[in-house]
Image (tube, grey):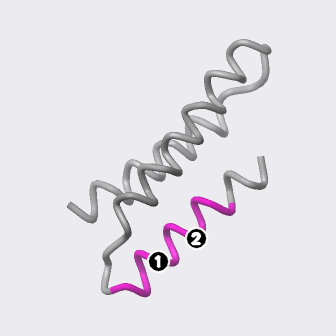
Amino acid sequence: MNTYYRMVIELMKESLTSVNRVNSDESLRVLTEIEKAITTAKITGQPLDELYQLKADVELVRALNE
């Protein structure tokens, strides 16, 4: 889980330091990784709330950069 938090934090830092722009390829990669983690969590019966929140955070960063 810490890996996903770090990915989202790095995206947010990039967004703040790059004149509010974030690399869309990187943000898509992070979103894909989190979606894979959500699928795995569903299959294995793990909690989903934190992953859904991280996904929402990445989607927000992507939306702000459009």
Residue at image coords 49%, 70%: 12
Mark 2 packing: few (<14 Cα in 10 Å), some, or many (20+)? some
Q: Quadrant of residue 18?
A: bottom left
Q: How many marks?
A: 2
Verify CB contact (< 8 Å) between mark 2 and mark 1: yes
Dot 1 falls on a residue whose secondary structure is helix
Which residue lies under the disc numbered 2? 10
Which residue lies under the disc numbered 1? 14
The magenta stretch spans residue 14: yes
Determine the residue located farthest toward the left in the rendered image.
66
Instruction: Read off the magenta span.
Output: 6-18
Q: Is residue 58 left or right of residue 62?
A: right
Q: Is residue 22 left or right of residue 56?
A: left
Residue at image coords 78%, 14%: 45
Q: Is residue 19 left or right of residue 45?
A: left
Cα separation, mark 2 vs mark 1, equals: 6 Å
Q: Is residue 42 above or below residue 22?
A: above
Residue at image coords 49%, 50%: 29
Dot 2 falls on a residue whose secondary structure is helix
Identified by mark 1, the residue type is Glu
